[in-house]
Structures are given as C-alpha cells and as structure tokens.
Image (cartoon, rainbow, N blue to C red):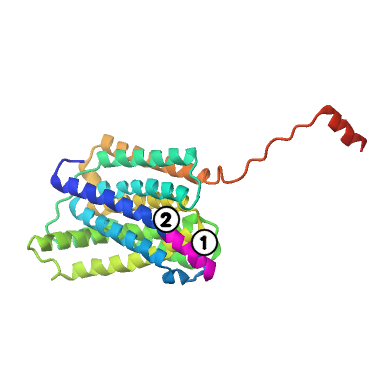
C-alpha cells in the first residue's frame, strides 16, 4: 500500500467498516434467534425478524459499515479495500464465541490467522488504482466484452441458484446462499466503485449526476444490496455464524477481485512475481477458510470417556 493520503484514508475507512460489519453478523443473528422463537424463521421464508429491534440494530451497524466501505472505494483500489474484510471475520468469530456460545476452538483461531495473513499479502502487493476522471470512463470499462461476459455469467448462475438449488439444497448446503450473495456482491462492488467515484468528482466540483450512467450504477447497487441482504439473512439463520462469515468473505473477495481485474485490468500493470504473490495470498485465505469449515463442530460435541474393563469383568460377562 502506498503512503498517499488517499490510500491511508481508504485504509482507515475499510478497517472501520470491518468492525461494524463484523458486529452486525452477531447482532442480527441474535435478532433472528428471538424472531424464530416467536414466529416463522427467515430460513423458512418468514419475516418476523423485521419486528425485532435487535435485528434492526444489527442492520444499522451493517449499513454504517457499508457506508464506510462505500467511501473507502472512493479513495483506494478494490484490490486494497476488499481483502481488509478479513478483519470482520475475526471480530464476528470472537463475538460469536463469547455471545452466541458458538465455540471458536484452536483450529478456528488458526483459520482466522491464515485469512488475515493472506489478506495482508494481497494488500501489500495490490496494484495502484486506475485514475478515473469521469463516470463515463467507468461505463466504457463496464461495457467492454470481458466484463460484459462476466456479468452475463453472474446473472445466469445466480438465477440457477435461486430457482433450482435454493429450494432443494438451501437448507443443507451453505454454498448456495453464500454463492448468491458473493456473486451478486462482485457486481455490487463494481457499481459502488462507479458511484463513489461519481460522488467524489461531484464534491470536487465536477457534477457526475447529469449522466444517466451514474443513475444506472446507483439502481444496480440498490437492487443487488437488497438481494444480498435477503440471502445473507437466510444463511445466518440456517448455519453457524463463525462459518458463514469467513466463507462469505472468501467467496465475496475472490469474485470481487476477479471482477475488478476484468473491469479495471489492474493486472496489466503488474509483473509475474507480484501476480504470483497475490495468488499465494488467495491460497492462504482459502486454506484458512477450509480449516474453519472442516473443523467447525470440533469441541461442540461432548467427548465420551474410554471404557476400561478388567479380566474378571470380562469373565463375568462371558459367564452370563
């Protein structure tokens, strides 16, 4: 990360965002649990959580975090801001351990540490942000064949997940709900980047809201955010928070960085060693998430003590 004031501002905003978003996972799950005890659960299509103040407090925390995250994209590149979401994993996992009693064992701690190390590696080797002077430039990048094909693939996959896989596997496979959120989130971030650039340029005296492209990106952000909120609620209400958070983070980060590379062509300015280092960072993050996911139930089941028998006891059993 460079030492420019914009990068420092983006870094501070991204860290603040992670703290608020990490807290929101726990607060919202508390509200979902209360709502599920008195009404139909969110995972079953219910919306009783809308009447829970605790859920709304968590929603406010998430909105504040997303606003901070939104602002961070105006100052720093996506490849720097997005990986810092790993901090929200640590925060939510620790809070889940103490508040929700979702035990975070030693392997969970190691998994979180691997996520942070991988994210740090990516941040330290992220390319410099592309200089944008108008939202029209972002529109030109978004309508190029590479990102256009990616966007079409995302739309098709999300539709298949929603209409085929959710009714069949949504309650048993975490990847279904989180996949919808992550794929949609990659498009959301690209649109957020466009709108944040438009706002920044507008505040500097160059009004970008006279262009239809700004409003198009704004509507995409709103629509995608609503979809993410809906399916994230289902994931949180169905699966362990300490697992939802890291899996969602890894998938969201991976798709977002890939979308950013496709749209802004950030790898074009890097050499092979920098790209290889970033890929190693991804592998480290994925390793941490795999460790969290595969060991999530360790320590939650009581360990049965071994039963020892004496020769006399065995003889008595045989005689009987």
Instruction: Return the residue at label 2.
Output: 26
The image shows residue 184 at horizontal and vertical percentages of: 36, 61
**What secondary structure is marked by label 1?**
loop
- Which residue, as the protein is rendered here, is positioned at the far left? 205
Please provide the residue range marked out in magenta: 28-40
The image shows residue 244 at horizontal and vertical percentages of: 45, 53
**What secondary structure is marked by label 2?**
helix
Q: Nearer the viewer, residue 147 or 116?
A: 116
**Crowding at mark 1 (Cα within 10 Å: few <14, some 14-19, many 20+):** many
- Residue at x-position 42% and y-position 61%: 28
Instruction: Return the residue at label 1.
Output: 170
- Magenta stretch, main secondary structure, is helix
Q: Is residue 64 left or right of residue 132?
A: right
Of the image marks 2 and 1, the number of the one nearer the N terminus: 2
Residue 113, above or below 67 = above
Q: Nearer the viewer, residue 244 or 26?
A: 26
**Crowding at mark 2 (Cα within 10 Å: few <14, some 14-19, many 20+):** many
- Residue at x-position 51% and y-position 59%: 238
**Can I make out residue 203 in this image?**
yes
Residue 185, above or below 106 = below
**Can I make out residue 40 in this image?**
no
- State the image quarter where residue 218 is shown: bottom left
Q: Nearer the viewer, mark 2 or mark 1?
A: 2
């Amino acid at each position: 990360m460079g030492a420019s004031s914009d990068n420092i501002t983006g870094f501070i905003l991204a860290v603040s965002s992670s703290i608020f978003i990490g807290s929101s996972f726990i607060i919202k799950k508390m509200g979902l649990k209360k709502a599920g005890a008195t009404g139909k659960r969110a995972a079953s299509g219910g919306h009783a959580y809308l009447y829970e103040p605790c859920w709304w407090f968590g929603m406010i925390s998430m909105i504040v975090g997303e606003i901070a995250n939104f602002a961070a994209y105006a100052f720093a590149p996506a490849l720097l801001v997005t990986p810092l979401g790993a901090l929200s994993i640590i925060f939510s996992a620790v809070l889940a351990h103490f508040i929700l009693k979702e035990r975070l064992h030693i392997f969970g701690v190691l998994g979180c540490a691997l996520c942070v190390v991988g994210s740090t590696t990516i941040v330290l080797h992220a390319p410099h942000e592309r200089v944008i002077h108008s939202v029209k430039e972002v529109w030109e990048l978004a309508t190029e064949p590479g990102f256009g094909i990616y966007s079409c693939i995302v739309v098709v996959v999300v539709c298949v997940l929603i209409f085929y896989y959710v009714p069949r596997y949504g309650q048993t496979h975490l990847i279904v709900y989180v996949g919808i959120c992550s794929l949609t989130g990659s498009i959301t971030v690209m649109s957020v980047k466009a709108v944040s650039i438009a706002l920044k340029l507008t505040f500097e005296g160059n009004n970008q809201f006279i262009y239809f492209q700004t409003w198009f990106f704004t509507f995409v952000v709103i629509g995608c955010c609503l979809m993410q909120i809906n399916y994230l609620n289902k994931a949180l209400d169905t699966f362990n928070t300490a697992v939802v958070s890291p899996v969602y983070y890894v998938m969201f980060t991976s798709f977002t960085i890939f979308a950013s590379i496709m749209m802004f062509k950030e790898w074009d300015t890097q050499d092979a060693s920098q790209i290889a280092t970033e890929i190693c960072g991804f592998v480290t993050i994925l390793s941490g998430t795999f460790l969290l996911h595969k060991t999530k139930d360790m320590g939650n089941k009581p360990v049965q003590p071994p039963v020892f028998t004496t020769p006399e006891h065995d003889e008595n059993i045989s005689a009987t």
